[in-house]
Image (tube, rainbow, N blue to C red):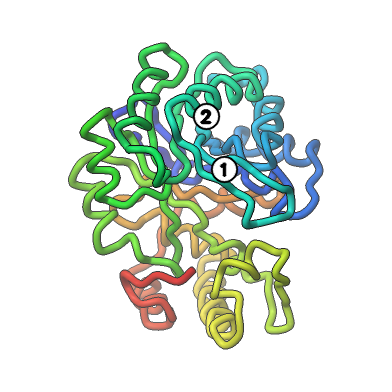
Amino acid sequence: MEYRKLDGTEFDVSVVGLGCWAMGGLSWGEVDDAESEAAVKRALDLGVNFVDTAAVYGAGRSERVVGRAIKGRRDDVVLATKCGIQWGVPGDFTSFTRDASKAMILRECDESLERLSVDVIDLYQIHWPDEHTPIAEMMAAMAELKAAGKIRAIGVSNFSAAQIAEARRHAPVASVQPPYSLLRRDIEPDLLPYCAEHGVGVLAYSPMQKGLLTGKYTPDSTFPESDARGRWDKNFKGERFLECLKFVEKLREIGARHGRTVAQVAVNWIVHRPGVTVAICGAKRPAQVEDNVGAAGWRLTDDDLAEIEAANPEPPGGGSY
């Protein structure tokens, strides 16, 4: 495993991180908690030390799974979680609410600490901007938690460059979590350069575009409205889906030259993008973790990168969601 310093912190983090959204179930279908715990433990065994979850993932279920899995191995983990989103009615994808008020952040932190069974959270992140709460208020809460020793570093997620700039006026920001993949590149024109200039770590989530860049789907695959992919991501719809599958076959061809899977090619591309600190790869089974880890320790060649760029239906700086 390769490691990088997370700017502004004491942490060296694995370039491939473990994302634990799916371990919460709900929007990702049924999961087995024992298998999820085994996935976390396997990640640690393979050198993955950055583990990312959130209070809203499964309405606390993911945090409880992670807490049980890291028991006795706390020193092996850079533990990240998030606050500011509340789950409404399970199964209703419109029922999320954003509340990053100071009172809510302070309360959520205590609840996360309890579910994770830890004394301190290494990286605590505001999950989404809350249009009803000034950024100054959000950051005041985060700074208070850091001063109290409940968190070690402050991060944000889904913030724009302008929102990060405002947040940094009130407290240090160690990192931002944006979506970034070969099929979603809208952070390239402004967010990546801003973070590089100001020493803000970039923790890229959804590097496999919700599984599309794993090579497991065919033209016959379907995604109902009850599935997060079918509801939100246009890459899984109509002609765009078929265009993406054609691109996946090019990644498969490139991967075969290196003895790598489609997913490993897609994540390797992210890991070596200038300014990216970590690629957060979701998993809920040990085998998925093992495949994800294979994205580290090697590099695509210049010729590979040129082929990928030529075949990619998403232009540099483009955004598809």
> In whole angstroms, how far apart are the C-alphas of marks 2 and 1?
10 Å
Q: Mark 2 points at which residue?
A: 79
Q: Which residue lies furthest to the top in this view?
A: 148
Residue 3, quarter of picture: top left
Q: Position of residue 278 (x, y in %)?
A: 43, 45
Q: Count the labels in the image.
A: 2
> Of helix, strand and loop, which one carries label 2?
strand
Res 285 visible: no
- Residue placed most toward the observer, 223 or 74: 223
Question: Tag 1 or tag 2, which sits nearer the N-term?
Answer: 1
The answer to whether 298 is drawn above or below residue 307 in the figure is: above
* The residue positioned farthest toward the bottom in the image shown: 239
Could you say which quadrant of the image residue 55 lies in?
Answer: top right
Q: Can residue 98 be seen in this view?
A: yes
Amino acid type of the residue that numbered disc 2 sits on in the rendered structure = Leu
**68 up-or-down from 268: above or below:** above
Which residue extends farthest left?
197
Q: Residue at x 73, y 48 (%)?
A: 90
Rendered location of residue 32, percent (x, y): 81, 43
Q: Is residue 241 left or right of residue 157?
A: right
Q: Name the residue under label 1.
A: 18
Amino acid type, callout 1: Leu
Image side of residue 120 versus residue 32, left or right: left
